[in-house]
Image: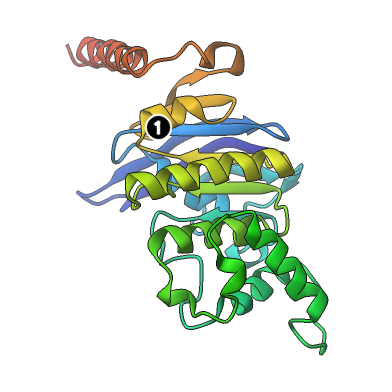
Amino acid sequence: MLRLNQIHKIFNEGTPDEKIAIDHVNLTLEPGDFVTVIGSNGAGKSTLMNIISGVLTPDVGEVQIGGKNVTGVSEFNRSKMIGRVFQDPMAGTAPSMTIEENLAMAYSRNKTRTFRRGVTKKRRDYFCEVLESLHLGLENRLQAKVGLLSGGERQALSLLMATFTEPSILLLDEHTAALDPSRAELITNLTKEIVRKYNLTTLMVTHNMQQAIDLGNRLIMMDKGQVIFEVTEENKWNLTIESLLSEFKRIRGVQMSSDRAILS
């Protein structure tokens, strides 16, 4: 479903501030895969997300979705295949529009534009039905401005909107990081339910190592723009935070020893 071939991205190339953000990364997600991504700040996680979504273009390499090369496809056109939820609950929705208007906009994303009324009774009934699944009472507040919702309510709505059209790829970019623990747990549970319900191919970046272990069927660890460690489904359930930290230290130790050998 998603294939990254030799993706390489450098920022500020040829200057003193040159930084290799993504270093020849190869990654494949099969249909229905739910891959969690961990790594320290600056590891390249968000850059990878931006390359997949079309915000950034790789200097080298190819992005394929559903077997199609989309490397040169714009972010706007790629959004028809990709749903994305950001860390900031203020992103992903239009705060000055109502819940109903936001849902109508998301619902129509992959549909041919017509002159018909945007929200019919049938569509409104459907909106209420899907909002009920959030268990937040939003189905009774269709005319409320989204800007008046709490952070958790907005993030739940963003998640719903991103998955409305059952996208080819769902990108979750630390989408619980800005929430308090109770709301983060709510969004985590909603994520599991929605991904399972629609069998969505999902890539989720998180700094929460326990969340990375508990969610999905695969886990990858990034460092300095590279995928340095991957755990497949059969081994993922034996992971602990301690074993992940130990593996990170071991790999970094090997790399540092190798660097010293090259320089000596």
Q: Amino acid at mark 1?
A: Ile
- The 10 Å Cα crowd at callout 1, few under 14, some 14 to 19, many 20 or more, is many
Of 202 and 210, nearer the camera is 210
Where residue 226 sits, quadrant-wise, is: top left
Q: How is the image coloured?
A: rainbow
Secondary structure at badge 1 equals strand
Residue underneath mark 1: 38
Quadrant into which the N terminus falls = top right
Where residue 19 sits, quadrant-wise, is: top left
Residue at image position (58%, 63%) is 75
Quick check: 200 left or right of 230? right
Q: Is residue 9 visible?
A: no
Of 152 and 102, nearer the camera is 152
Residue 169: x and y in percent read: 65, 47
Residue at image position (57%, 82%) is 143
Q: Is residue 165 visible?
A: yes
Vertical arrangement, residue 91 with respect to residue 46, above or below: below
Residue at the left extreme, as displayed: 264
Quick check: 101 left or right of 20? right
Quadrant into which the C terminus falls = top left
Where residue 54 sits, quadrant-wise, is: bottom right
Residue 206: x and y in percent read: 40, 39
Vertical arrangement, residue 103 with respect to residue 219, above or below: below
Quick check: 197 left or right of 247? right
Of 61 and 38, nearer the camera is 38
Residue 219: x and y in percent read: 50, 25
Residue at image position (58%, 39%) is 192
Residue 55: x and y in percent read: 50, 59
Residue at image position (30%, 18%) is 245
Q: How many marks?
A: 1
